[in-house]
Amino acid sequence: METVSENRSFEGTQGVYSHRSEACSCDMTFGLFLPAEAADGPVPVLWFLSGLTCTHENAMTKAGAQAWAAEHGVALVFPDTSPRGDDVPDDEAYDLGKGAGFYVNATQDPWARHFHMWDYVSDELPGVLAEHFALDMDRQAITGHSMGGHGALTLAMSLPGRFRSVSAFAPICHPTQSDWGRKQLGAYLGDDETVWAPHDATLLMREAGFDGPVLVDTGTDDQFGDLLGTEHLAQAMAARRQEGQLRLQKGYDHSYFFISSFVEDHVAFHAAALYR
Amino acid sequence: METVSENRSFEGTQGVYSHRSEACSCDMTFGLFLPAEAADGPVPVLWFLSGLTCTHENAMTKAGAQAWAAEHGVALVFPDTSPRGDDVPDDEAYDLGKGAGFYVNATQDPWARHFHMWDYVSDELPGVLAEHFALDMDRQAITGHSMGGHGALTLAMSLPGRFRSVSAFAPICHPTQSDWGRKQLGAYLGDDETVWAPHDATLLMREAGFDGPVLVDTGTDDQFGDLLGTEHLAQAMAARRQEGQLRLQKGYDHSYFFISSFVEDHVAFHAAALYR
């Protein structure tokens, strides 16, 4: 593992690190904020999965989460959203290939060799973090934005016991029924839609739900609202009486200005679960 | 109007008053909490509509709302849930007749003469309040529990501009499709279901929504959860991108212990809208 940069931030450290990824067969880069408390021993971890077109850097520099993570003594992990490098295939569209890993393990060419973001985020990166940093991997929580909200919700429901709480900003809620989903799941996983189902938060909520609290914020003026399918997740949460909150925030759109406006609530929500 | 009782409460006054109701053709009783600020001039008003079997008294004595209304300088109105008196018809069931007015104007015998709770709460009682108390009727908000949550939501959406905010505890969300609804709407309004529709919060949310913030709390262990239809309102709120929050509170049931646990949030929510 190589240190790309480390900056003092809210009395802790905002680091960027790169390492060889077996899962993605390429070098991968991630951001990690460690609060001051990490100098004294392991701290709990909040994952932030980012959306289409993002690298590890966008949320790290624009979401404003470090202020609140420092207040609560929580670390923040910012993974990249896809494999990277000159030998990694890409697509001309913004929503496929690099920057659009969709948190699945691709089985279809040309994606099958590198695009294993599910394994990377759920298995390989946690191992790297546990090995190198003062993190309490028994206390993890997860959030994300848009495609990353999809990733956070599907990972949380698919890995019972891993995360104590899950939240999302403007998540893609029902990708098997959305243009943000059908295209990517088809390209990465093939035409058999039965293998898409484990990557659809609404379907997972209907079948299993999450053993902990859920918080979802979405703006009423989200310019991609029709692609998110929020109403399907809302129905599924209420129907199974899932502990949680769904908030429709008046006038907010899909941007990081929306995220930064409510990230304080999300970090506090996770801190309550992590320090319970 | 007659004063039944007045008690000092949180530096204000918890009163109970009775008056002749033209709408219900009987004497009606209501509770009114006035915060200390009412001595200096009109204060904003938060209505609390109660559920099946309740009188004006249950929420007044068990919800614990006065503490927070005093903190925010907001008055609380606690209407009764049906007409009362020996000459008012009743039913052996707990969910029809006295204590079960359902916030509609009955058109069917034997209910048509007295059971006009819609007119009472939306028109007559506001006039009584404005005449006798230091209330700012340009700043009103409304909440309620169960049948009263149904009433709060339907009144708020049917009277645009009247209420700045609406909330509900474990509301009946879709009465045209629930045993808590079909029985009462049929008895009071007759078999023509087209006249039921204006009294269904989910249908109103689908068609019009509410021009202000909405807050709904329901317990995940609500013993009447199947009768509430929360998932239908959740779907409708998210589909129209209604400004609002739906919270599913883990382990809470349908009781006043649930209400009192979250009434602080609801009063603060309304105060934010009333003092905007």
Image (cartoon, coloured by chain):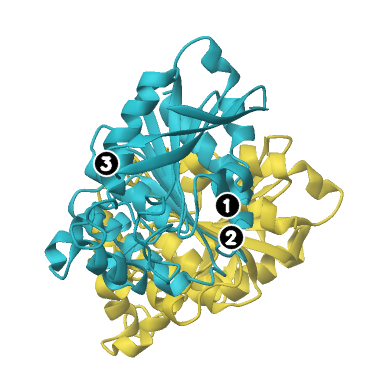
Chain colours: A yellow, B cyan
Residue A102 is at least partly visible in this image: no
Instruction: Determine the chain carrying the residue at label 2.
Output: B
Element assignment for label 1? helix
Query: Residue pushed farthest top?
Result: B40
Q: Which chain contains the residue that carries disc 3?
A: B
How far apart, in angstroms, are the residues tagged by discs 2 and 1?
A: 7 Å
**x, y percent for residue B42:** 44, 16
Mark 3 and mark 1 on one chain: yes
In the displayed structure, would residue B61 be above or below residue A100?
above
How far apart are the two marked residues, 2 and 3, measured between alpha carbons?
A: 30 Å
Mark 1 belongs to chain = B
Label 2, residues with CA under 10 Å away: few <14, some 14-19, many ≥20 = some
Marked residue nearer the N-terminal end (2 or 3): 3
Q: In what element is the residue under mark 2?
A: loop
- Are dots 2 and 1 on a single chain? yes
> Residue at horizontal 48%, vertical 71%?
B224
| Tag 2: amino acid | Ser
Q: Marks 3 and 2: in contact by CB < 8 Å?
A: no
Residue holding disc 1: B259
Amino acid type assigned to the residue bearing label 3 in the image: Ala
Q: CA distance from mark 3 to mark 1?
A: 29 Å
On residue B156, which mark appears? none
Q: Mark 1 belongs to which amino acid?
A: Ile
What residue is shown at x 65% (from left), y 72% (from top)? A162
Asked whether disc 3 touches disc 1, contact meaning CB atoms under 8 Å apart, the reply is no
Mark 2–mark 1 CB contact (< 8 Å)? yes
Label 2: which residue?
Answer: B255
Image check: A252 left or right of A125?
left
Point 57% across, 42% down: residue? B60
Q: Mark 2 or mark 3: which is in front? A: 3
Q: Counting residues from the N terminus, which is met first, the one under dot 3 or under dot 1?
A: 3
- B248 horizontally vs A181: left or right: right
